[in-house]
Amino acid sequence: MCAQVANTLGFEKRQDERFGPDFRWLTVAPPGERTELVLAHGYGAWEPERVGKFTGIVLGADDIQATYETLKAKGVQFIEAPAAQAWGMMQAIFTDTDGNQYVLVGPAAADATGGAQ
């Protein structure tokens, strides 16, 4: 996930610290943004059986279809294309190179253009 986030998704690497052979603290963020995403290896409640499952990380996009097309062209593997959800937004699901799943959400097409909901 580290290289994929920093390169493919266009995030900047902000911190990359190693503390011995088993612990790494990496932060990434969209260019120009203050909020950083921490990607830590060997920290806290990490469990090997969680690899390849949903991460709990949800990313937002103003135009989910355009973001989906851009990321797909860069090689991001989607297991679910953007689709309208019962709760009123669009959602797509992609995976990193380890099979971990991430959700991409955005407003429905009418919402994104200022139309009625």
Image (cartoon, grey):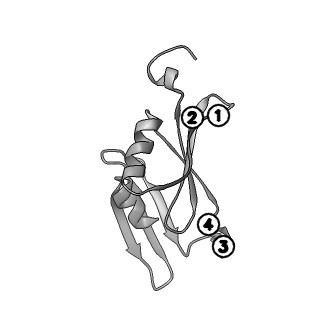
Residue nearest the observer in this picture, 91 or 42: 91
Residue nearest the observer in this picture, 1 or 14: 1
Residue nearest the observer in this picture, 74 or 104: 74
Q: Crowding near pointer 3: few (<14 within 10 Å), some, many (20+)?
A: few
Q: Do the numbered discs 4 and 1 sit on residues whose CB atoms are within 8 Å?
A: no
Residue under circle 2? Answer: 90
Regarding mark 2 in the picture, which secondary structure is present there?
Answer: strand
Residue drawn at point x = 43 percent, y = 33 percent: 63
Sequence-wise, the earlier of marks 2 and 4 is 4
Residue under circle 3? Answer: 47
Identify the image quadrant of residue 70: top left
Residue under circle 1? Answer: 85
Sequence-wise, the earlier of marks 2 and 3 is 3
Q: Do the numbered discs 3 and 1 sit on residues whose CB atoms are within 8 Å?
A: no
Sequence-wise, the earlier of marks 4 and 3 is 3
Residue drawn at point x = 46 percent, y = 24 percent: 112
Cα gap from disc 4 to disc 1, whole angstroms: 23 Å
Residue kind at label 4, given as amino acid type: Gly
Q: Is residue 73 left or right of residue 40?
A: left
Q: Position of residue 88 (x, y in %)?
A: 63, 28
Q: Do the numbered discs 2 and 1 sit on residues whose CB atoms are within 8 Å?
A: yes
Q: Is residue 64 left or right of residue 103?
A: left
Cα gap from disc 2 to disc 3, whole angstroms: 30 Å
Residue under circle 4? Answer: 52
Q: Position of residue 60 (x, y in %)?
A: 49, 40
Regarding mark 4 in the picture, which secondary structure is present there?
Answer: loop
Residue kind at label 1, given as amino acid type: Gln
Q: Is residue 84 left or right of residue 109?
A: right
Q: Quadrant of the C terminus?
A: top right
